[in-house]
Amino acid sequence: MQHNSGIKAAPTDRARSTRRKSPAPETDASLGRIVRVLMGYPTVVISGTKLAQEIGTTRSEVWRLVEQLRTLGVEIAGHPSSGYQLTAVPDLLLPEMIEPLLRSTIFGENVHHYYRVGSTNTVAMDAAAAGAPEGTVFLAEQQTAGRGRASNQWHSAESTGIYCSVILRPALPPSDVLVLSLAAGLAVQSAIQEVDSHALPDLKWPNDVLIMGKKFCGILTEMNAEATRVRHIVVGIGVNVNQNSFPAELEQSATSLRLTTGIEWSRVEVCAALLKSLDREYHKLLENRDAQAEILRRFEERSSSARGRQVRVEEKGGFEGMTEGLDPRGFLQVRTRQGLRTVYSGTVRFK
C-alpha cells in the first residue's frame, strides 16, 4: 500500500519466481511427538521400544530423534538400553507444544515449525499465495535472513526469541490494513503483560514495541491485494525473549525481556499468549464496526510517544516536530513549525 510504512506490498509472481530458493525443510514432526510422549510420563523412564510404538517408528529412529532433540537443547536423560526421560520441560516452539494452547483460536490447527529458515514471512507469503488457509502459523528457532521494516535485518539468535508469521485473509480494503498492524502491536503489549504484569511494554508507531526505551519487538505486515480487496496478509512478529546480549551495532537500541526483567521467560508461554491476544484483536476488528476507531484510540493511550513527543522524521528530506496522535486511517501526525504533517513512510526517531 502506498505510503504505508507498516505494510509492505508483495512483489509480483514473476519477480518472486526469479529469486525464490528451495524452502528450508520443516522440523520433523516425529520430534514433537517424542516430546509429547515423554511429557505424558514425566516421572517414568520410557523404553526405546515403547517410544517407537507410540510414534510409529523403529528404536534406531527413536535414538536418532532423541539425539537431534538434544542438539536443540532438550534435556533428555538415558540411552537406548535404559530408556529415556525428560529432565526439564523443553522450550521449543514445536506444534505439539503450541497447538494445545491455541485450540479456541484460528491459530490452533496449522502450526509449522522450522529449526532454521531464511525468513518466516517469506515462507508464509509463499504459502499464502499457494492457498494456505487463514490462521496458518510459521515458527522458527532461528532465522538466517529475518526481515524488518525498510529492508532492515532482524537479528534472530537461535532459540532465544519468537520468530513468528501468520496468514490472515480479512474482508478489508487495502486502505484499512495499517490498523491491523497497529492491532498486532496492541496484541503484543497485552500478551507480555498477561505473562508478567510488572512488565511495561510501550508502543512506538507504527510497528515497534519497546521496553525501558529499547526495542524488543518488531512487526512486519505484508499483503497481496487487488485495488479494492485484500487477498491475504502475513503478519510477522519478532520478539526478543531470552537474549543475553546483542551485536555491538544493536546494543544501544535493542533489548530482550530477559535483559529488562532479569528472569528467563518461557517462549512457549509467551508465544501462546501472543497468538491468543492477536486472535482476540483480529476478531474485534472484523466483528465490530467501531473497532478501527477503538484500536486507534487504544494505541494512542498505550503509547508514550503518539502524542506530545518531540521527534525527527526521516521522510522527504526530514522534518522535526511534536507528535499529535493518529489520523482516522492510523497514520502519525506531527506538528511542525510549518503546520501539521502526516507521516506515511518515514522512520520516526525520538529527539
Image (spheres, helix red, strand yellow):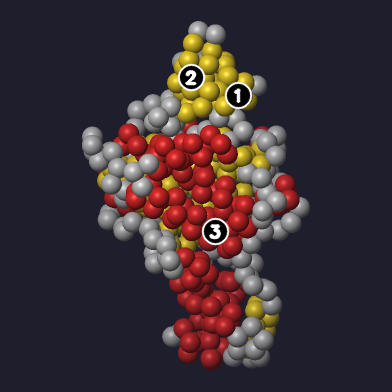
What residue is shown with label 3? 273
Left-right relation of 193 to 237: right
Query: Is label 3 in a helix, a strand or a loop?
Result: helix
Tell me residue 187's x, y (percent).
51, 49
In the picture, the quarter occupied by the N terminus is: top left
Q: Is residue 18 visible?
A: no
Tell me residue 165's x, y (percent).
45, 52
3D distance between C-alphas at marks 1 and 3: 31 Å
Residue 298 lies, with reference to residue 95, above or below; the image says: above
Q: Nearer the viewer, residue 232 or 297?
A: 297
What residue is shown with label 2? 315
Query: Is label 1 in a helix, a strand or a loop?
Result: strand
What residue is shown with label 1? 308
Query: Is label 2 in a helix, a strand or a loop?
Result: loop
Residue 129 lies, with reference to residue 214, above or below; the image says: below
3D distance between C-alphas at marks 3 and 2: 35 Å
3D distance between C-alphas at marks 2 and 1: 20 Å
Q: Which mark is residue 158?
A: none
| Amino acid tagged 3 | Ala
Tell me residue 198's x, y (percent).
70, 51
Nearer mark to the viewer, of 1 and 3? 1
Do the CB atoms of the residues marked 2 and 1 lie less than 8 Å apart?
no
Left-right relation of 231 to 218: left
> How many C-alpha atoms fall within 10 Å of the one at disc 3: few (<14), some, or many (≥20)?
many
| Amino acid tagged 2 | Glu
Tell me residue 19's x, y (percent).
35, 42
